[in-house]
Amino acid sequence: MRQKILTIIALFLIIVMTILSCKKANEDEKQVVVTNKDNIDGRKIRYIVLVISGSNSSLKSGNHADSAIVSVSMNDSIYSKSTDTSGIASFDFLNSGNAAVSVRHKDHTTVSYIVDLTMQDKDKYDSNNIRTASTMVALFPINGSQIATIKGMTFADLNLTIAGNEVAPGGLNIHTVIESSQLLNYVNHSSAGKITQIAYSNSTNNTQTDANGNYSINVPASGRGLKIIVYSDDFAYNQTIAVNSTQRKIYKFERDTLLVFSSGVNFQDIDYK
């Protein structure tokens, strides 16, 4: 009888343990529910950056920029690589999400941008659970034969007793900067690899007028045309309003935009009001 009771107890314990084990398995299975399709089951992203020089008229036939340094910052980590002879830098095993990227190259503008590496509907993984995102970005020459030049004279109505404008005083500050709204036209990307923000540094140039009111300034350029904003500091001058009578006046110049091309020379006179 005692042996029979022990057998019944043992069978009861086995049944209880089986039920608990099944319940635990079901709970574990529920915990595996993941809404993000990336970063599960070893899934990773290969991000490819193609860097070209914007000096050519077409980005598709642009010069590959080898030896550019591409840095990708994501999740408190920074990964840097140099582009190869095809202008490509490849980063493997990245996670999903946004990444901050900078690209710098000797004698070119430096570009910084935010790229979205989140999976898109048409993105697919290969047999190794890796999907590819890519971005093409152009840099603009700031030295060498591919830059453009903007030059001209500066004028202002310094004497109201004489018809027309006079040459403005020397030593005035003239500035140029790349017009920002066009910058997204110089990138291309796959469905994942979309650039959401972009900015170019080394893109502001400065000079001063000489004693004769002339100025000349070198600017980044593109073979397909790059919009450059020209602007100037205000200046104060004792304007002649009558014989032996002057009045202090602040002269201003409204910003103007020029389309410059690689190796081109553009003339832009500046009239202060």
Image (cartoon, rainbow, N blue to C red):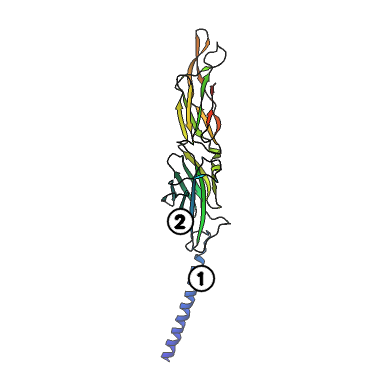
Q: Are marks 2 and 1 in contact (CB under 8 Å)?
A: no
Task: Where is residue 11? Give x, y as percent.
Answer: 46, 84
Residue lying at the far right of the rendered structure: 122
Q: Which residue is tagged 1?
A: 26
Q: Position of residue 89 (x, y in %)?
A: 46, 51
Query: Seen from this angle, which residue lies furthest top?
Result: 243
Q: Where 207 falls versus 70 (above or below)?
A: above
| Residue 92 relative to residue 254: left or right | left
Q: Total number of numbered labels?
A: 2
Give the vertical position of 181 relative to 267 (above or below).
below
The residue labelled by disc 2 is 92
Task: Identify the image quadrant of the N terminus.
Answer: bottom left
Residue at 45%, 54% (x, y): give it: 91
Is 214 drawn above or below residue 39 in the view shown?
above
The amino acid sitting under disc 2 is Asp
Whole-percent x, y for residue 168 in the image = 49, 19
Q: Nearer the viewer, residue 55 or 94?
A: 55
The answer for how far apart the CA atoms under marks 2 and 1 are is: 35 Å
At label 1, the amino acid type is Asn
Q: Residues within 10 Å of mark 1 (few under 14, many from 20)?
A: few
Residue at x-position 47% and y-position 43%:
112
**Quadrant location of the C terminus?**
top right
- Of badges 2 and 1, the one in the foreground is 2
Residue at position x 55%, y 31% in the image: 257
